Image (cartoon, rainbow, N blue to C red):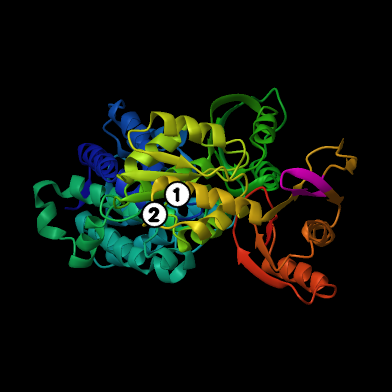
């Protein structure tokens, strides 16, 4: 096969889009980088679908016209980090094929190589072990093949094989992939697209030239239906910039002069995972940020905003975790705790909690959320630890309408919930457990350290914005601009002559080193106290403290 004509290229695009669509959920299940939000497959599918639609609507018999349509369609439909990168791979592909009626083997290899160069330029901080690496290695295999053969099918086969080889190596290149035992999700999606290209080119002969190997088949059979998704093995608090923000700007020459480099430089200050690309008529932006509004406002300086999108990736990730937990094996006695932060969840699980509902301060689960967890547990009876005063009412309402007996232990803090578990006896009656666990709540003093979001005065304590404030059993007691001082001061207020154990749980915005500083400061005055430090990873609270 010496060349690719327009009909063959249409088939390549159609089957690539079809293959990506069929495997989107599998790709989603691998998604852990750059954030574990579980939508890489969905985004690549929508991007490819938009490009395929544009090709289908173009009746030209010239390859160059079809690749132009593919690139434009993918750019306009690009979703997410992976989708924008994929669109740039095919933007470079189209640039190398402009004006061509057909493609020979070397031109095909050159087009993939130019796609790689374009995609790398679009990413401000390329990371190896991702879709970029898979695309680059695949292109290198294609170029090597093109130097030895003029058969386009052999070049496309080499490109697919190069993608496979590179994909299998991604866990060695990106530690987070090795940590959870998966290959890169974007790279896997790209392999599906390239396989579709090869199938479209070869037709009925596809299975003769390309047989998935045993390792790949094993990998494809391992899906979200047979094991927990990779994303659920990581922690929500690891997401530094929580809003996946996208916009398309229809550039307007009557507004501010558009310079792509300056555009990228400004947006890079607002977040990470930035991709900003332009074809001269529109600019497409994908960025992870805490300030979506600033991104949109900046885009409006250069033209009218087209498609805009904001996804809360923290909620996306928690949804994945909740889904995986809902599919856990049924238990006879469900002990359900509301908690946020991977370390806090592990603490509860280590002492007997077998169901976790993601939530807490700023993210209160609803009655429906609690009911669903009770139902999915398959248990005959359940106990709920709300661990937040704002959640107790929802828990009580869920208990009233539940099909099984449900007891509520009215814990208002994480510390109270952990202490209550000390009295849990799986062999005891539901009512006896609730009574014993509720009694334990009085044996712990709870403290919470967080940042103030405004100036105010509460309980005769003058609070200043961005200071650290300490709350003891829900009452604000401390304000200090220094985290160590605020935490130490709060703990001093929590102590009495019967105090024996102080437990510090540090959160996503604090560290073990800071916890040790607090302990060292307190040990100078209280050598009779026992201190414990745990990594909770919780959002909102820099420290959760209990004194028993």
Q: Which residue is mark 2?
A: 428
Quadrant including the C terminus: bottom right
Packing grade of label 2 (10 A; few <14, some 14-19, many >=20) is: few
Name above or below for residue 440 compared with residue 504: above
Asked if disc 1 and disc 2 are in contact, CB closer than 8 Å, the reply is: yes
What is the x, y in percent for residue 391? 56, 36
Q: Is residue 232 visible?
A: yes
What is the x, y in percent for residue 349? 46, 59
Packing grade of label 1 (10 A; few <14, some 14-19, many >=20) is: some
Name above or below for residue 306 compared with residue 150: above
Secondary element at tag 1: helix
Q: Is residue 86 visible?
A: no
Say which residue appears at 84% left-offset and 60% top-offset.
Answer: 485
C-alpha distance separating marks 1 and 2: 6 Å
Q: Is residue 471 magenta?
A: yes
User: Is residue 144 or residue 495 the one in the foreground?
Assistant: 495
Q: Is residue 97 magenta?
A: no
User: Is residue 372 or residue 312 the one in the foreground?
Assistant: 372
Q: Which residues are the magenta region?
A: 466-477
- Residue 481 vs residue 412: left or right? right
Q: Which residue is mark 1?
A: 432
User: Is residue 57 or residue 359 the one in the foreground?
Assistant: 359
Tally of numbered tags: 2
What is the x, y in percent for residue 182? 36, 62
- Residue 282 vs residue 205: left or right? right
Task: Please tell me the numbered disc located at residue 188.
Answer: none
What is the x, y in percent for residue 157? 23, 59
- Residue 261 vs residue 517: left or right? left
Name above or below for residue 448 compared with residue 254: below
Q: Main structural element of the magenta stretch: helix, strand or loop?
A: strand
Secondary element at tag 2: loop
């Amino acid at each position: 096969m010496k060349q690719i004509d327009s009909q063959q290229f249409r088939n390549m695009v159609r089957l690539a889009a079809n293959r990506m669509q069929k495997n989107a959920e599998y790709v989603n299940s691998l998604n852990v980088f750059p954030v574990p939000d579980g939508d890489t497959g969905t985004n690549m599918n929508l991007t490819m679908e938009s490009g395929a639609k544009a090709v289908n609507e173009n009746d030209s018999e010239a390859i160059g016209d079809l690749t132009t349509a593919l690139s434009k369609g993918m750019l306009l439909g690009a979703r997410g980090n992976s989708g924008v990168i994929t669109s740039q791979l095919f933007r470079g592909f189209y640039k190398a094929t402009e004006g061509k009626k057909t493609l020979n083997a070397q031109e095909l290899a050159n087009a993939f190589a130019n796609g790689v160069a374009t995609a790398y330029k679009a990413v401000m901080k390329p990371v190896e072990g991702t879709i970029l690496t898979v695309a680059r290695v695949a292109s290198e295999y294609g170029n090597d093949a093109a130097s030895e053969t003029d058969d386009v099918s052999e070049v496309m086969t080499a490109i697919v094989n190069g993608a496979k080889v590179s994909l299998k190596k991604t866990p060695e290149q990106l530690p987070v992939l090795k940590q959870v035992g998966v290959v890169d999700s974007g790279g896997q999606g790209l392999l599906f697209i390239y396989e579709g290209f090869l199938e479209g080119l070869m037709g009925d002969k596809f299975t003769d030239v390309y047989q998935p190997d045993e390792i790949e088949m094993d990998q494809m059979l391992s899906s979200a239906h047979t094991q927990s998704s990779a994303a659920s093995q990581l922690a929500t608090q690891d997401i530094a910039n929580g809003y996946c923000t996208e916009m398309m700007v229809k550039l307007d020459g009557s507004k501010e002069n558009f310079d792509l480099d300056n555009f990228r430089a400004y947006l890079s200050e607002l977040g990470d995972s930035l991709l900003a690309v332009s074809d001269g008529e529109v600019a497409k932006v994908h960025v992870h940020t805490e300030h979506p509004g600033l991104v949109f406002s900046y885009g409006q300086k250069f033209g009218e905003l087209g498609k805009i999108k904001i996804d809360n990736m923290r909620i996306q990730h928690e949804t994945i975790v909740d889904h995986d937990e809902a599919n856990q094996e049924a238990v006879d006695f469900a002990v359900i705790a509301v908690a946020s932060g991977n370390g806090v969840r592990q603490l509860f699980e280590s002492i007997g909690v077998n169901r976790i509902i993601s939530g807490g301060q700023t993210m209160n689960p609803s009655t429906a959320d609690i009911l669903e967890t009770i139902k999915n547990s398959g248990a005959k009876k359940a106990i709920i630890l709300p661990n937040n005063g704002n959640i107790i009412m929802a828990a009580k309402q869920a208990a009233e309408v539940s099909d099984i007996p449900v007891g509520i232990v009215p814990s208002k803090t994480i510390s109270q919930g952990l202490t209550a578990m000390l009295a849990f006896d799986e062999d005891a009656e539901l009512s006896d457990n609730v009574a014993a666990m509720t009694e334990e709540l009085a044996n712990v003093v709870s403290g919470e350290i967080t940042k103030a979001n405004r100036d105010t005065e509460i309980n005769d304590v003058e609070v200043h914005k961005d200071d650290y404030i300490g709350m003891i059993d829900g009452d604000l007691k401390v304000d200090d601009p220094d985290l160590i001082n605020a935490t130490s001061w709060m703990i001093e207020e929590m102590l009495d002559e019967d105090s024996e154990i102080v437990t510090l749980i540090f959160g996503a915005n604090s560290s073990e080193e800071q916890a040790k500083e607090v302990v060292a400061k307190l040990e100078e005055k209280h050598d009779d106290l026992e201190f414990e430090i745990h990594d909770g990873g919780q959002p909102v609270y820099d420290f959760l403290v209990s004194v028993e």
